[in-house]
Amino acid sequence: MMEALFTDYTLRTVALGASLLGVVSGALGGFALLRRQALLGDAISHAALPGIALAFLVTGSKAPLVLVTGAALAGWIGAALIMSVTRRTRVTYDSALGIMLSVFFGFGLVLLTYIQRIPGANQAGLDNFLFGQAAALVEKDVLVILGLGSGALVLLAVFWKEFKVLSFDRAFGATIGLPMKRLDHLLTALFVIAIVIGLQTVGVVLMSAMIIAPGAAARQWTDRLGRMIVLSATFGAVSGLGGALVSSSAHHVPTGPAIVLIVSAIVVVSLLFAPNRGLVWRRIREWRHGRELRVDAVLLDLYALASQHTSSDHPHAERVLNVMSGVSASARPTLRLLELLGLARKIDASRWSLTPEGVERAQRVIERQYGS
Amino acid sequence: MSASVEIQLIAVVVAVACALPGVFLVLQRMAMMSDAISHAILPGIVVAFFLTGDLGSPWLILGAAGTGVLTVALVELMRKTGLLKEDAAIGIVFPALFSIGVVLIARYAGDIHLDVDAVLLGELAFAPFNRFVFGGVDLGPKALAIMSGILVLNAIFLTIFYKELKLVTFDAALGAALGFLPGVMSYALMGMVSVTAVGAFDAVGSILVVALMVAPPAAAHLLTHRLPTMIGLSVGLGAVSALGGYWMARFLDASIAGSMATAAGVVFMLAFLFAPEQGYVPQAIRRSAQRVRFGRTMLLIHLLHHEGSPDAARECSVDHLEEHLRWEHGFAARAVRSAVSKDLVIRSGNALALTTTGRDAAQTALVHM
Amino acid sequence: MATEKIDAAIDVRDLTVAYGEKPVLWDIDLEVPSGVLMAVVGPNGAGKTTFLKSILGLVRTAAGSVLINGRPYADMRQRVAYVPQRGSVDWDFPTNVLDVVMMGLYGQVGWVRRPGRAERDRALMALDQVGMESFAERQISQLSGGQQQRVFLARALVQDADIYFMDEPFQGVDATTERAIIDLLRALRERGKTVVVVHHDLQTVPEYFDHVMLLNVRRIASGPVGDVFTEEHLRTTYGGRVSFVRAVAAAT
């Protein structure tokens, strides 16, 4: 499969395009995630459709750069309208998103079907943008992705610290003299570009995942913005490459969905297994902590019982420890654990006592908890 | 009935069926769930289709409803981990589910006409060809039968649970305290959305479902504060969008669903611009009048503060207003003119002075602050 | 020798902010001399945060002007530092304490350039001033309320400004942090800086501040605490909840 990457022109092109797309959408999507713009990405990708149709109608050309420019303009206008509608009336953000998304898209459909009726005009290729037809990517498309994508990434790097402030504390940024409104427009524009270069590959519906999922996954692995964005770009690239490979080797698996499923899997794995934040680690930590608490509790119970007798290895019935343990669990598993740790010893079927090490540790726990 | 009438009937029924749950989605700020659900139900439909082998089976609707509820459950689950915000969860869950659906179709149903195009876009024009035949009688287009059934279901649900829906929408905490289960209501609402979406797929596709669930209620929200009125208006505006869209499509020979979505957008835009209280144009006009009134009051109070004081001559002059209050030239002149015309201020050259009425007005204004 | 008029640190004239027809701030005149610790108090919704934000240009004004050291605010940004409310940001943002403090210097670092060693050292010094130097690499989501507040303070201190505007810095912080903050503010005052603080707790006004402004849409009164923080003024500001007001005034 991997050598096909070098021999098969189509696979090479698709893989390259998809990976580049993954890098750009992952990088810019990280910021979108932090700015809570996941669904804005969805709306912009739908809003791009009439732009594509109009670009074709106006120029008669289906050159990728032309169509992408049309898509970008339409996406940008859509985003601007959303902002303006929510600012001036009590229409809520989510409603504005939903309206812009469906109305622009619907209008795009009208244009597409209108184009279909024009004699001689061929709407094939235009609806690649709808569903993503990665297999139809050619070198020119990849060059557009590369060109626009690297431009966007360069600007991201140049204005990195300003974008950081914009995303974290916009009001503060204004007070130190940064032009927050213009920076916001710029970052949104880069966001629009990241979206429209991906439409051909994954299509309108799936684009929001390409934008958000890599960043959501990356966030779980690191607490540093720089690393998060780099990791997000990496996840995007891996998903793109992986999707292309899977799609070419398996039968009847379209590239777009393959990419999205891979990146979604990365998200799930990250949510579960990332150190620190990951749910599995959280559960283990809680369990360990709970166990530690139980160990200390039973140890201290044994110590308390023992201190009522002359020798510390006086045995005590498990039943007593169960009662002292409180309502829920039996003390037996913890006693077994104490035995394993060398802190307690089983005398017979149901009686336990402390070892000298156990006594020592109990004393240390008391010191720690209550001060010496 | 002619095909044209049948199509329009279907269109209106779809619009009304969508408006009902749409009102509550919009009020609960969950409009984008309509987008998420209408895409995410794809795998549910596909699996149901695989199990029954029949594209027209009612199990498809159940499959869709189930997946819709699953979508909401997954989003909630992700949100509760605290590792993701809700919008990110939505933006990840529905594309993943949609992808599963697409892959299933591509791999196992490639030659059967369960076409992704149709799912997204639908085509109302073909609806009259698909008849609902019961006991040998042609009862009209299948789409009409299905959507009417769904419309009735939605209406019944709304009627029975009106109180609960209203409470949950406006005060979830109170609803929970009173023993209504906001969670259950929410899931039920999403179930409604899923069922409506799948019913409408064949005819109009998922995008139009979003347009009809969000735009008419959002427009209605700009026109009224009362829930019953809002529901009624949403239904009406939805119907208007449907019919308007149909005729637009006829005229342009273009996609009916797309035209209906566009028409819904136009309706919303008109409401956005011209709604008497909330609309942009009335607001702008009012704002303009407000600013002059406001400026006039400020002028009166300013004069009141400074009359009789040592720097009265300087403070109570027209030029000074612009400098001191940082007003533009035109605005100061308008405020002064307005005050003079209402007999609140006397102007002699550059100097301004309060009349008795003006002084009273200034003092009243001060008290009311 | 002719006496020169020393510009007030902050000179607010006729500041008016309105939403539609509803005035939020009305015709505010205020002169704050330098080297002063001033509290801004008033009931909820009285416009205190809006007052700060309108001075800083974050909110559009219907009328009025603001002079900092005799010059318009827009020209004097680098002499002014802002400490917003803690709740105004998402503390789950992936960044650490040092990074947040260095953000205070981004305006001075300029475009394209990355903050370097010099900025890092200044940030560490500022953190040291608030007792958070050992937290420099700590992720901000792991901070307590008091620690968050101190980070915001350090971000303001690092700018080495003359005038500081703070929005409820004592809200929801532990006692140790509160003492640390007030010591810090007093140290700023000793160095001739001017500090304006929106304050939520009337009880501590006489103890912490030397000047106060009573605000309820309009400026009720302003000036030295001793002269201004009276029962009568408080009653006008807070609308006559007499026993509460009397208790506070008695504490002065």
Image: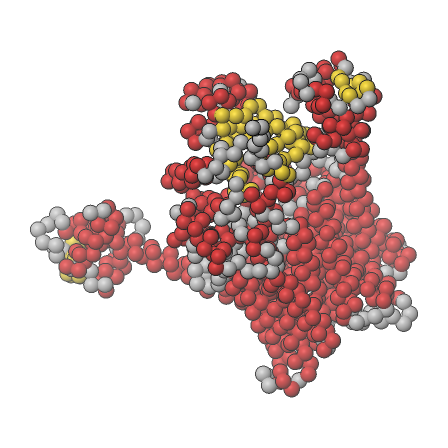
Residue B234 in percent (x, y) is at 75, 43
Comparing C159 with B286, the one in front is C159
Question: In which quadrant will I find the N terminus of chain B?
Answer: bottom right
Residue reaching furthest front?
A: C1
Question: In which quadrant will I find the C terminus of chain B?
Answer: top right
Q: Is residue B296 visible?
A: yes
Is A255 placed left or right of B262 in the picture?
A: left
Would you identify the image quadrant in which residue C12 lies?
A: top right
Comparing C239 with A253, the one in front is C239
Q: Is residue A345 above or below residue C186?
A: below
Is A208 placed left or right of A235 in the picture?
A: right
Q: Is residue A275 above or below residue B352?
A: below
The number of numbered badges drawn on the structure is: 0
Q: Residue drawn at (51%, 36%), measured in percent from left and top?
A: C194
Is C99 placed left or right of B54 in the picture?
A: left
Residue B247 in percent (x, y) is at 88, 53
Q: Residue drawn at (48%, 57%), measured in percent from left and top?
A: C118
Comparing B34 with C116, the one in front is C116
Q: Is residue A124 above or below residue C26?
A: below
Residue reaching furthest top?
A: B356
Is B69 placed left or right of A61 in the picture?
A: left
**Figure coloring:** secondary structure
Residue A353 in percent (x, y) is at 16, 57
Q: Residue drawn at (31%, 50%), measured in percent from left and top?
A: A328
Q: Is residue A21 above or below residue C111?
A: below
Residue A244 in percent (x, y) is at 63, 76
